Amino acid sequence: MNIILEEIENRTALYALVSRLMMTEVDAEFINSIESNPEILNLFPNYKDWGKRKEFSNNILKERYLDVDFTNLSLLHLIPYESFYTRDDQMIESGGDNPIYDIYNILDFKVDLEEARVVSPDHIGVELEFMYVLCDAMKKAFKANDEEAIKEFLLIQKGFLKDHLLNWAPMYLINMKRESRTPLYHDGAELTLEFMLSDYEYINELLEEK
């Protein structure tokens, strides 16, 4: 299997980035982490050219524009939960009956809903964080030269993307991109969608190799 550590690290970092962006409002530290890294900033081209970045401090950008946009996209106008898109009654399954709990429990992935400030474990930010955890675990397997574990993690990642994230998140992200009022969330929606689709293809290509 032709896989290198740098690719695993890049995937891990990207899942960490987009899961944080989708989970809660950004803070000054997150904004600084984007703006201090030219490679990351280039992933947000419209935000990079946003005139208000030069006009206002990061704190003002956050309070006046970014927090308002996040609230509209995640709490008021759009619903970032898998069960809303996949249940016939469009209800969010916030209890223990949510089937995604079974997947998390098998791999000992714990979700603190209160800390994450979400009402259900099938929030897009939590599901993306789960992919980050899987990639991070695969990185440890790579360093241990455990090819069997690497393949197993790839199969789990493929299944989770296919059966969960790619089954509903594109609809949310397309709406998010259309409804966004700031370039950060416009670019973030596009980045997340394109990355998930390309990552799914990448995983399939690795698994097809002998």
Image: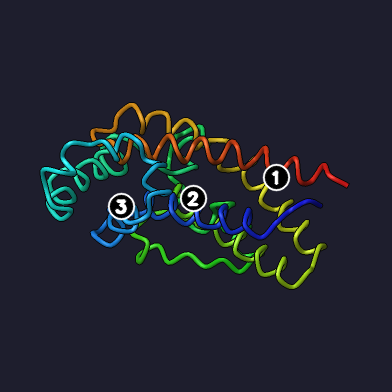
Label 2 and label 1: CA atoms lie apart by 22 Å
Task: Please tell me which residue lies in front, 38 or 91.
Answer: 38
Amino acid at the residue labelled 1: Ile
Q: Choose mark 3 or mark 2, whichever is in front.
A: 3
Residue located farthest toward the top when viewing the structure as drawn: 178
Residue drawn at (75%, 40%) of the image:
205
Label 1 crowding class (10 Å Cα cut-off): few <14, some 14-19, many 20+? some
Residue placed most toward the observer, 110 or 83: 110
Single out the residue that lies furthest toward the right: 210
- Please state if 82 lies on the left or on the right of 152 as rendered: left
Percent position (x, y) of residue 109?
56, 66
| Residue 15 spot, x, y in % from top left | 51, 52
| Between discs 2 and 1, the one toward the N terminus | 2
Left or right placement of residue 185 versus residue 6 in this view: left
- Give the SS element for disc 1: helix
Of labels 1 and 3, earlier in sequence is 3
Q: Residue at x 77, y 64 (%)?
A: 149
Residue 89 is marked as none
* Number of residues whose C-alpha sits closer than 10 Å to that of mark 2, classed few (under 14), some (14–19) or many (20 or more): many
Q: Identify the residue under disc 3.
A: 35
Could you tell me the amino acid type at mark 2?
Asp
Relative to 81, say whether 12 is above or below: below
Residue drawn at 63 percent across, 53 percent down: 7
- Secondary structure beneath dot 3 equals helix
Q: Distance between the Cα atoms at labels 3 and 2?
A: 30 Å
At 34% across and 53% down in the image, what residue appears? Answer: 34
Say if residue 102 shows up in the picture. no
The image quarter containing residue 141 is: bottom right
The residue where tag 2 is placed is 122
Q: Amino acid at mark 3?
A: Glu
Q: Is residue 168 left or right of residue 208?
A: left
